[in-house]
Amino acid sequence: MKNARLMGSLTLSLVTLCTATKTLAAGPVGPVTTGVKPGQPVRTIELNLDKAIPIPMQRPKFELKATVFKTIDNKEGWAISIPGGRPIATPAFWNGMLFVGGGYGSHEFYAFDAQSGALAWKYTTGDDGPTAAVVEDGLCAFNTESCTVYVLDAKTGKLVWQEWLGDPLMSQPAIYKGKLYMAYPAGQSHGNNQISTNSVHGNGNGKNESINAKYSHRLLCADLKTGKHLWTHPITADAISAPIINDGQVLLTCQDGTSFCLNADSGAELWQKANAGTSAPLATKQGIVFTQREDRKKLAYESLQVYDKEGYARQAMAAPSSPAPYLEKGSAMNGMGKASMAQLDSSVGFSTAPMSAQLQKASGIPVDNVVGGWAYQGSRVATKGNTFFYNNGTNIRSSAKDSNLSWTANVSGKGITPNSQLFSPPAVGKENLYLASSNGHILSVNQKNGSLNFDYSTNNPITFQPALANGNVYVGTSNGIVICLKTGLKDAIDWTAWGGNAQHNKEE
């Protein structure tokens, strides 16, 4: 893809793009509470990861063959070494199968038997960097960082359709009601699909696509089975992690902190908001939850804010603002140091990020290279009942939807990088949370009180969120290993992809 990369790095011509949109002011409306009711104590738990139970696992000797392990407390599992030793995104589960990209810089995508780890099929991509997959209606969708979206038959691995969209692609696709949603950089795509768009969006098709400095990217809606373009809509930067789909709406936060809400069927813009967003939103019955950056005396803070469907902030924050040094440029990415990130980008032809990535816009999050944009997830919120769960640096927090901070777990131990985001976003079981850490831990805490259920050390850094299915916890490590930990608990189920489902928006 050298020619594509060269074209993607050239400065794009800018043409004014006129859009009839409703733009909302950033920030909450009315007085903002502190998030903690007076006189109500917050339960604080101290978790020392040095007390973890080790998983007796060395790097599997044979690639793509499961090596079985058993812990001292009789938990079983398996590990698979993926060729290349690259960072692995969240596995996806469907119909007894596990779907895993070969990692940033690889050209392979795999399906395994989810219980045994046996290889079911392998697909070789035309360009590099398969990200996390989503599976629905028997179709498995994923994209490569450079530069293509793929849809495969989930049972066989046979190609259904593919399309080169643009370089780089740093977020994942989503699926909703037979449609695929994907963000991409504008002005590069050379697909031949017929596209139906709202007139304010331009033609949205390939090299003739008009763009301006503000709207450097597009969100595509395509038919899942055929790839036919249904609509595109201009967005201000690549999406953080993925588009989020709920109740007929597409929600996304771009890397420049701007959030959008679109009609999932037509692509019509319902609202956009420059709200300094720092992770993908979460849509709940109570409203849409955003993590937002604030700057106080040149120090970064982060808070949770709930908006209604019309995009207006509630008067009370969902949680109090907290220091967030992990949002500063130069902070460590989960499981990947600066040197390894530079090596990974160099391995796919990036000495610096191309102009098409528009990473200069990502001033509020610690993303300054392509692999960082590919892996960044932030403090993305999860929910269960009346409670939000999220990670704040080296803490795990629980906040009730009535604005009470109910418990916080302070985490300590060897290998924790100060001022870093220690955990990827939590996966939600029936009663417990499941987390993976940059220093190689897989742990579970009780949702109601934060007490520790288990903590296992893999001795391998983990960047992405776990998946849960049939009592098993599945993680991909930052050095190319897929691990299945069989908890034996019925609690660890139904979290089948990053964000919980193919819409990336599972609400318990």
Image (cartoon, grey):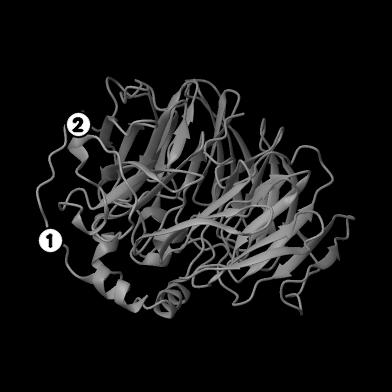
In percent of width and height, residue 97 lies at 72, 52
Dot 1 lies on which element?
Answer: loop
Question: Along the polypeptide, which appears first: circle 1 or circle 2?
Answer: 1
Quarter holding residue 61: bottom right
Seen at 77% across and 61% down, the residue is 117
Label 1 with label 2: CB-CB less than 8 Å: no
Q: Nearer the viewer, residue 416 or 315?
A: 315
Mark 1 or 2, which is nearer the eye?
A: 1
Badge 1 amino acid: Ser
Badge 2 amino acid: Thr
Taking 45 as reference, is 11 left or right? Answer: left
Q: Is residue 150 visible?
A: no
Residue 21 numbered tag:
2
Q: Nearer the viewer, residue 165 or 65?
A: 165
When the figure is inspected, residue 231 is found, relative to residue 150, above or below; the finding is above
Q: Residues within 10 Å of mark 2 (few under 14, many from 20)?
A: few
Q: Residues within 10 Å of mark 1 (few under 14, many from 20)?
A: few
Seen at 16% across and 53% down, the residue is 213
Taking 43 as reference, is 105 left or right? Answer: left
Q: Is residue 133 visible?
A: yes
In percent of width and height, residue 363 lies at 27, 55
Seen at 65% across and 41% down, the residue is 495
Q: Nearer the viewer, residue 60 or 159?
A: 159
When the figure is inspected, residue 188 is found, relative to residue 251, above or below; the finding is below
In percent of width and height, residue 508 lies at 62, 29
Gap between marks 1 and 2 measured at Cα: 23 Å
Residue 13 numbered tag:
1
Q: Nearer the viewer, residue 317 or 472?
A: 472
Dot 2 lies on which element?
Answer: loop
Quarter holding residue 369: bottom left
In percent of width and height, residue 435 lies at 63, 49
